[in-house]
Amino acid sequence: MAVKVVVAGATGKTGRVIARGVSQASDLELVGAVAPHHAGRRLGNVIDIPGVDIPIHASVAEALARRKADVLVDFTTPEAGFGNAMAALERGVRPVVGTTGLGAEQLEALDAAARRAGLAAIVAPNFSIGGLLMERLAAQAAALMPMVEVIEMHHAQKKDAPSGTAARLAERLAAAGARAPVPVHSVRLPGFVAHHEVLFGGQGEALVIRHDAYSREAFVPGVLIAVRAVVHAEPGLITQLWPLIERAAQA
Ligand code: NAP
């Protein structure tokens, strides 16, 4: 049976690409979309998503009351993402949250709510496979080259700074032995999508690890892996995607 998925933020820059990716996966079924400013319209009339005719709802609560779903994928706003994930768990639906900007207290609350509901939940600031590899390689380098700084560069509309990926990179680098706190520099410019550089300075040498997401397609494979995994995972919040990616690669 296909996993039934509602996408919150399905008309947004990222959510529309994710919605398209879900609709094209034979083992998943896109059953609903949430986007407050487009409520009442059909998703296929708002974004290019061949063969899909589903309604857009005003809120996650409304979508999950009307559509039977297994998973809520959320790519919305830092203000909405947490409440949407909680609303999903309250209705027995597992959240996969790509929305960035959730704080430590919110993550703790989601973990507690997921355990109470007996469901798994996933929150990850970067679903791209290359982005996850960057994090792992940078942590390895930080143990030997502790003088490190991070530059994150994004499109001018991005609402939060630093990016969730950069904030997490800084934490991960410090935990791996980098000089803490690791400085993070944010750039917001038109034309950019999502780019991260980890710069290590040593004696007479420098090392740069860079990841570029040229299009939001970069996030689709990781999100689909998370959607498939969250259905079977143990109750509680998962914030480490890498084990899921490795398991999917071995399957
Ligand atoms: P965007 O283009 O501004 O789209 C936001 C979407 O959220 C729109 O569809 C909007 O619908 C909807 N929305 C707003 N408030 C909502 C609410 N209360 N409930 C449900 N939907 C709501 O944003 P974006 O650039 O795609 O980014 C979305 C989020 O994803 C950001 O936090 C970004 O940092 C994050 N992101 C994460 C990753 C990752 O790998 N984890 C990758 C890329 C982006 P209306 O237009 O109808 O209001």
Image: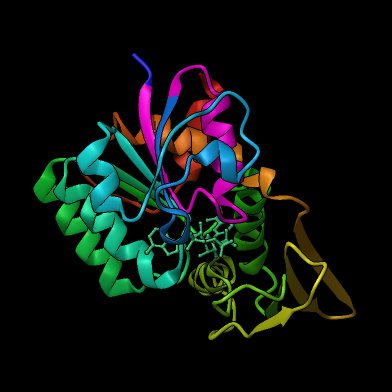
User: Is residue 222 in view?
Assistant: no
Find the residue positioned furthest to the front.
Answer: 40
In the depicted structure, whether residue 82 falls above or below residue 21: below
Place residue 136 in its image quadrant: bottom right
In the depicted structure, whether residue 41 falls above or below residue 156: above
Image coordinates for residue 122, horizontal then vertical, percent: 36, 48
Q: Is residue 184 left or right of residue 203?
A: left
The colour scheme is: rainbow
How many numbered tags mark residues here?
0
In the image, is residue 10 part of the stretch drawn in magenta? yes
In the image, is residue 218 part of the stretch drawn in magenta? no
Image coordinates for residue 62, horizontal then vertical, percent: 25, 49
Q: Considering depth in this image, is 123 or 179 the residue closer to the camera?
A: 123
Task: Tell me what residue is drawn at x 50 percent, y 34 percent.
Answer: 224
Q: Quadrant of the N terminus?
A: top left
Q: Start and end of the magenta stretch? A: 3-28
Place residue 47 in its image quadrant: top right
Find the residue positioned furthest to the right.
Answer: 204
Image coordinates for residue 26, horizontal then vertical, percent: 51, 17
In the depicted structure, whether residue 64 falls above or below residue 67: below
Q: Considering depth in this image, is 223 or 240 the residue closer to the camera?
A: 223
Task: Tell me what residue is drawn at x 48 percent, y 40 percent.
Answer: 42
Task: Tell me what residue is drawn at x 35 percent, y 28 percent.
Answer: 4
Q: Is residue 175 left or right of residue 165?
A: left
User: Is residue 57 in view?
Assistant: yes
Find the residue positioned furthest to the top.
Answer: 1
Q: Is residue 19 left or right of residue 228?
A: right
Image coordinates for residue 157, horizontal then vertical, percent: 65, 74
